[in-house]
């Protein structure tokens, strides 16, 4: 998880909000970025330009979410979803991405650029229309190796059910670390705090908690707030 890599960001295009079932495995990446002191407003503006143009102009970019830690607004994350590797490569050649990269030396701390490569397990969303009530969660879970498959068999159906029956659940994404298959990353978007609290009271969520109570060694909830959340909506991907 802690590999520091050359910084690459990306994002996407425009199309409908109908269910989109991807034939190939999508690309799901998380970037952690340290923003230089006094540069948060500049970062927000550059990220907004990159995200907005990418979602509007790139058919293969399915979602891009700019979020920041509540405890330290100078630590930002970009959560990005592409239809496949070709879509990601096309984004890297886009003018908006190149403009963003050109300006990063003046915005991003050179020693705080980290990319988390993942294996998507479940990616599901509705069209996100962000407002002041919209919230998001970012959680990292370490699963005991002997429960790897059992955990997956429990958590993925729970996420499917949440999206299906809860109007306030806007996006649920689960992925495992490419270098450590027992480390799970969960990124979720809810219409409001009330929608999240209602989710926590549902039978499927309570059942998930009970069944997995002894399957994990660590859970880290990174408290984050959304800057800009854009997607195409209707994504459904489940890894067999």
Image (tube, helix red, strand yellow):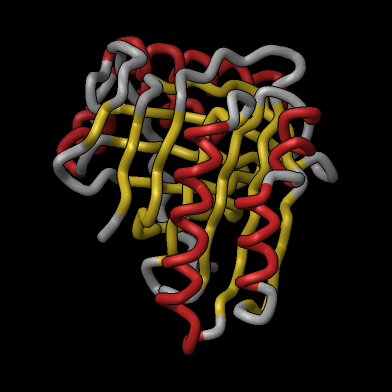
Rendered residue at 46%/18% (across/down):
127
Q: Nearer the viewer, residue 19 or 70?
A: 19
- Give the residue furthest to the front: 203
The location of residue 41, given as percent across then percent down, is 71, 19
Left or right of residue 110, residue 139 in this image? right
**Is residue 47 rendered to the left or right of residue 16?**
right
The percent coordinates of residue 98 (x first, y second) are 34, 25
Q: Is residue 147 visible?
A: yes
Q: Is residue 141 left or right of residue 133?
A: left
Q: How many labels, in total?
A: 0
Closer to us: 119 or 77: 119
Q: What is the quadrant of the C terminus in the image? A: bottom left
Residue 149: % across, % down = 40, 76
Q: Identify the residue at the far right of this view.
A: 71
Can you give x and y, in whole percent of width and height, for residue 140 in the image?
A: 62, 61
Q: Residue at point 45% right, 78% down?
A: 148
Q: Quadrant of residue 194?
A: top right
- Placement of 43 over or under 161, stated as above or below: above
């Amino acid at each position: 998880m802690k590999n520091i890599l050359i910084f690459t960001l990306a994002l996407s295009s425009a199309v409908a909000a109908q269910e989109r079932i991807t034939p190939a495995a999508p690309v799901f990446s998380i970037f952690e970025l340290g923003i230089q002191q006094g540069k948060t407003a500049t970062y927000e503006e550059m990220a907004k330009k990159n995200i907005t143009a990418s979602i509007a102009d790139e058919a293969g970019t399915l979602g891009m979410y700019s979020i920041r830690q509540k405890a330290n607004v100078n630590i930002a994350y970009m959560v990005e979803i592409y239809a496949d590797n070709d879509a990601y490569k096309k984004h890297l050649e886009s003018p908006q991405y190149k403009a963003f990269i050109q300006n990063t030396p003046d915005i991003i701390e050179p020693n705080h650029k980290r990319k988390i490569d993942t294996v998507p397990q479940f990616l599901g969303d509705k069209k996100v229309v962000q407002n002041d009530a919209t919230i998001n969660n970012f959680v990292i879970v370490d699963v005991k190796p002997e429960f790897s498959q059992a955990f997956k068999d429990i958590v993925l159906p729970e996420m499917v059910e949440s999206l299906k029956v809860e109007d306030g659940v806007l996006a649920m994404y689960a992925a495992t670390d490419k270098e450590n298959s027992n480390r799970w990353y969960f990124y979720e978007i809810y219409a409001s705090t009330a929608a999240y609290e209602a989710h926590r009271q549902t039978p499927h969520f309570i059942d998930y908690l009970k069944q997995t109570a002894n399957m994990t060694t660590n859970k880290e909830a990174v408290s984050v707030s959304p800057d800009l959340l854009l997607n195409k909506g209707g994504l459904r991907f489940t890894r067999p």
